[in-house]
Amino acid sequence: MENQNLSVISAVWLLAVVWLVRRLLGGGSQIAAPSNGSSVPEAAGGLPVLGHALEYKADAPRFLLDQCARVGSVFRINLAGKRMVIVGAGREAIAATTNAAETVLSARDAVLAIGFREALGDLNVREGTDFHKRVLKAWLPPAQLGEEVARMHAAIVAALHLELDFALGAQREARVRDLLTLVRRVVLRAMIGRMLGVALLERAGAELIDEVMRFQDALEDAIAKASVLPRALALPLALWPVQRRRRRLCALVRTALDGACDTDGRGPWLRAFETDGTPLADRAELVVGLLFAAHKNPSIGGAQAFLHGVEHGGPELTAMRAEAARLCAEPTAAVLATCGALRRCALETCRVTAHPIGAVRTIVAPAGFALTDTRGRTHHARAGETIALSHVAANLDARTWGADARQYNPTRTEWAAASAMCDARSFASKGDVDEFKFTTFSQGLHKCPGEKLSLVVIQSVTAALLGGTDFELEPLLPLPPVSFERATLAQRAAPVPVRVARRARALR
């Protein structure tokens, strides 16, 4: 409770400073205030200058869901001067937003406006997403994804063993400070090994793991600050420091890449660099962008699925442990397809921990953009405004998910069809639930291309943590509450300590 109070006090001070700076600089907001050309209703409540920032920070899902109930599923919020139009739920508005062409709603302009050019580099913003989609599609077409299950699972288990062996040393039992940090390191190692190749991991060593994690944390913090600060202050206080950190990381990656492509352990991204003749400096930049995008949300999803499963307990946890043992003994697509409890847990965890603000678009069409809410009202947003889709608001909507929509419930009827499918290609199936009801992986033109691979990673991580390896992991209860503060899947409000012990068979 003390930490939460301090967090609120810090937020008040930060927002007060933002307000003072805006006054001194004569405004400086990156998103202009609404004009007569916009008919989108304002969210209810709010404070002078600070707008809805404190309510949003205190509990983003509750704030967004309450606004959907009070003013409708399309509304405008003000986060200390940063104004945006929220699409909270509704198939029509979500489909219109996610299927609009880049010349109407620009994803690129939206990420540039909040500092991603400095944070991730111009190459990643301009070309990175398309490049990574192309390589992923060539590496894992639908017919071959099943073949990756065993390889990715083996990489995750090997990385977990390495991290826990280091944490325990000669001891039989120890306490790891934070489960989510542990799983991030594990998934990052596995992703580097599978996507880039073990040669790169061997050349860079633990230093690469440490630097990527520090960079990602710094980037998230910088983007959060840049979203509310005037750009004149955001550059020196947030964006330029993370830009320097990215350049140091790129230098480390360049050193590791230099010569790594001459080995037999090349992953699909290194092979694509060779085929395309990509210059070394550009390879390093694209690798940084890949690692930023590929590892953190699947790792959080895996850790949170494990924690939600343990916290929920009961017959579902018993079933998950039995499936984890089977999967770790025979990690194939055919076995994973029969692990209904693991799949239910993964899907339900992704539902309740989804981003409060996910896809973001800037309206670039001169005529603006029309959005129809769930009450049948059509609102007009003007050119220059930002539209933000709230994944968690759609995922927790009681009208589509029932009265218990805000609760974790892996046995809800929506997942019954998914967990009942047992053919060899159903290991990442959502059953009958479509992307406008379960919105975690987005929709339309910018739908997450790694959705199925992410679900494989989440289930493999959960299985490994549940005891399918040489280690037993037991999180210390009570768990810290779920926190939506970061621009990722929801994490936890504090570190999650976990007791780790070697199994008796591993000591023989």
Image: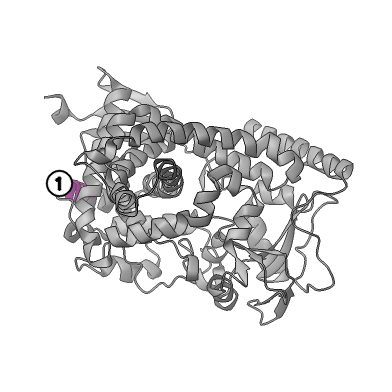
- Extent of the magenta region: 324-328
In terms of image quadrants, where is residue 147? bottom left
Q: Which residue is mark 1?
A: 329
* Amino acid identity at mark 1: Ala
Question: Could you say where residue 128 lies in the image, as x and y percent from the top left?
Answer: 46, 54
Say if 15 sits above or below 343 in the image: above
**Seen from this angle, which residue lies furthest top?**
170
User: Between residues 224 and 302, which one lies in front from this camera angle?
Assistant: 224
User: Can residue 262 be seen in this snapshot?
Assistant: yes
Horizontal side of 316 relative to 39 (left or right) equals left
User: Between residues 45 and 367, which one lies in front from this camera angle?
Assistant: 367
User: Can residue 348 be seen in this snapshot?
Assistant: no
Horizontal side of 236 relative to 294 (left or right) equals right
User: Between residues 454 and 24, which one lies in front from this camera angle?
Assistant: 24
Residue at the spot 81% in from the left edge and 60% down from the top edge: 33
Question: Could you say where residue 376 lies in the image, as x and y percent from the top left?
Answer: 66, 82
In terms of image quadrants, where is residue 103? bottom right
Residue at the spot 68% in from the left edge and 73% down from the top edge: 365
Horizontal side of 424 relative to 63 (left or right) equals left
Q: Residues within 10 Å of mark 1 (few under 14, many from 20)?
A: few
